[in-house]
Image (cartoon, rainbow, N blue to C red):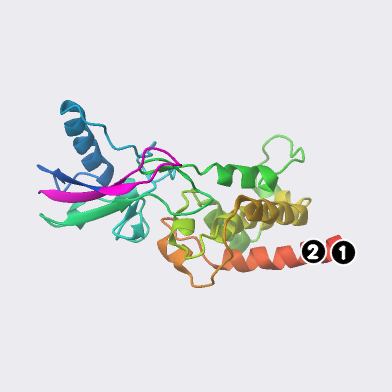
Amino acid sequence: MEINLKVWKQKDAVSDGKLIDYKVSHVSPDMSFLEMFDVLNEELIVNDQEPIAFDHDCREGICGMCSMVIDGKPHGPLEGVTTCQLHMRSFKDGDTITVEPWRARAFPVIKDLVVDRTAFDRIIAAGGYISVNTGNAQDANCLPINKDDADDAFMSASCIGCGACVAACKNASAMLFVSAKVSQLAKLPQGQPERYTRVANMVAQMDKEGFGACTNTGACSAECPKEISLTNIAQLNRDYMQAKFLENA
């Protein structure tokens, strides 16, 4: 296969960027999208050209680092996969593919396709944890949890914090990410002591980081590689209202 790429190149957060044309030959349909970029970068280095900067780590759909907007869609055309799980067989010989970074004020570009997502880390640090001493690990049957609640908590915890929800939202909202991190603890006994202070602190930090308001269009869930449900946002809204009621009581 031969692939034509239009890739966003930007020196740093304060420089102007632009799309640069590249051609990649001898692309195997079995290559992942990131492996195709590896081939391109090797060619650029051999020709004394600057390689394209992009994020990656596990390349197994777990870490959430491979943040690319491919032909206008976060993580590309397939549903329920990250960029590293996207293979070139999803494209045709001679296709032109446009690749850009996440677009959000809270995710400033560091270089090329790499963005600064430490805003998510600060949101987690604001309350996405359990500070009480829960002791040593207990047998599973010592903490009876409703099966539906356990399943919901597990699904919420599957969020990998990639930021695709932010990139997909027209307001660059982080509500799906924050709601997943709130819900995974709100459904479990260990998360109850700090349940309402948690949601208030995390939402406050989210607003401080400059993320936009929720649009309720569902683009976040549709583009999420882990298919996090919008019901988490409803859970967050309920807990946030309760938190404010308790705060003013």
Where are the magenta residues, as a range? 2-19
> Viewer-proximal residue, 117 or 224?
117
Cα–Cα gap, marks 2 and 1: 6 Å
What residue is disc 2 on? 244
Q: Is residue 147 visible?
A: yes
Q: Label 1: how many residues lie within 10 Å, few (<14), some (14-19) or many (20+)?
A: few
Three-letter amino acid code at the position of disc 1: Asn
Is residue 239 shown above or below 177?
below
What residue is disc 1 on? 248
What x and y, as percent, mark residue 160? 49, 48
Residue for point 76% across, 57% down: 196
Are dots 2 and 1 in contact, CB under 8 Å? yes
What x and y, as percent, mark residue 140? 63, 46
Residue for point 77% across, 66% down: 242
What x and y, as percent, mark residue 63? 44, 42
Residue for point 21% across, 42% down: 36
Three-letter amino acid code at the position of disc 2: Lys
Tally the numbered discs: 2
What x and y, as percent, mark residue 146? 65, 61
Q: Is residue 153 left or right of residue 244?
A: left
Q: Is residue 150 visible?
A: no
Q: Is residue 139 left or right of residue 116?
A: right
Secondary structure, mark 2, is helix
Q: Is residue 86 left or right of residue 117?
A: left
Residue 130 badge: none
